[in-house]
Image: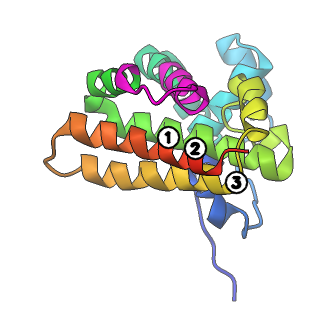
Amino acid sequence: SVILLSSRSVAGVLPTIASRCAIVHLTPDEDFTQQIMRELDIDDTSARVLKDLSGGFADEAVRIYNDKAFMKLRSETIEHTHKLINQKSSAISATADFLESGKERIADVVGVMQSFLHDISVQQKTRNPALIANLDWRSEIERNASHFTSGAISNMIRVILEAERRFLIPVNFRLAAEKMLFDILEERNRWKK
C-alpha cells in the first residue's frame, strides 16, 4: 500500500518519518527560484529559503519576505538555537528571555527551532544542500552535523514538540520554556559526539 503525506515544507516533517519517505516535490512553478529572485531582487540562497518557507508558492513567498517581523524572529530563533546547542555551559537565561519576549508567536519560534534541528539531521544523513530548508545557515548546519549524533537531534526535536503542546495549555510560560531548554541541553550532553 502507498500512503501519501503532504507537507508545504520538508522542514515540517520529523526526521524519523522523512527517512522512510520518498520525497516528491510538487510545486506550482518549476522556475520558482529564478522568478522570486527577479521579483524580489534577492540572491539565490534567499530565494531558496523563501521557496521552502512558502512551499513553492510565489504569493506566499512575497508575503513571508515582506513580513520583516517574522524574518527577524526566524533569524534570532536560529541564532539562539545554534548558541544553545553549542554552548559549553548550561546557561539558559538569555534564550529563556528570548522565548518569553516572543511568546505570542511561540508556534513560529518552535517551528523554526525544529526546522533548524531537522536541517542538521538532514545534513547528517544526506549531505545534500538541496534538502536543507535554512540554507542561509548552511555553514552552521554543517558544523553541527558533525558534533551531534542523529539520536541527539531527534531527541531535541522531540523535546521541542512536547514543549509546544505544553505551550498550548494554560501554564507558567517561563517555567515551560526553561524546562524545554534544560531538556534540550540534557539531550545534547547525553548524545554529543
The answer to whether residue 35 shows anywhere in this view is: no
Considering only vertical position in the picture, is 144 above or below 13?
above
Q: CA distance from mark 2 to mark 1?
A: 5 Å
| Magenta-colored segment: predominant secondary structure | helix
Q: Would you say 81 lies left or right of 97 here?
A: right
On the image, the x and y values in percent for residue 4 come to 63, 72
Q: CA distance from mark 3 to mark 2?
A: 11 Å
Magenta region, residue range:
75-94
The answer to whether residue 160 shows anywhere in this view is: yes
Question: In the rendered image, which quarter contains the C terminus?
Answer: top right
Identify the residue shown where x is 58% and y is 50%.
Answer: 190
Pair 3/2: label in front: 2
Nearest to the observer: residue 32 or residue 187 = 187
In the picture of the structure, the residue carrying the numbered disc 2 is 188
On the image, the x and y values in percent for residue 124 come to 79, 47
Determine crowd level at label 2: few under 14, some 14-19, many 20+ residues with C-alpha closer than 10 A.
many
Identify the residue shown where x is 74% and y is 19%.
Answer: 37
Question: In the rendered image, which quarter contains the N terminus?
Answer: bottom right
Identity of the amino acid at label 1?
A: Leu
On the image, the x and y values in percent for residue 119 come to 68, 42
Pair 3/1: label in front: 1
In the picture of the structure, the residue carrying the numbered disc 3 is 150
Determine crowd level at label 3: few under 14, some 14-19, many 20+ residues with C-alpha closer than 10 A.
many
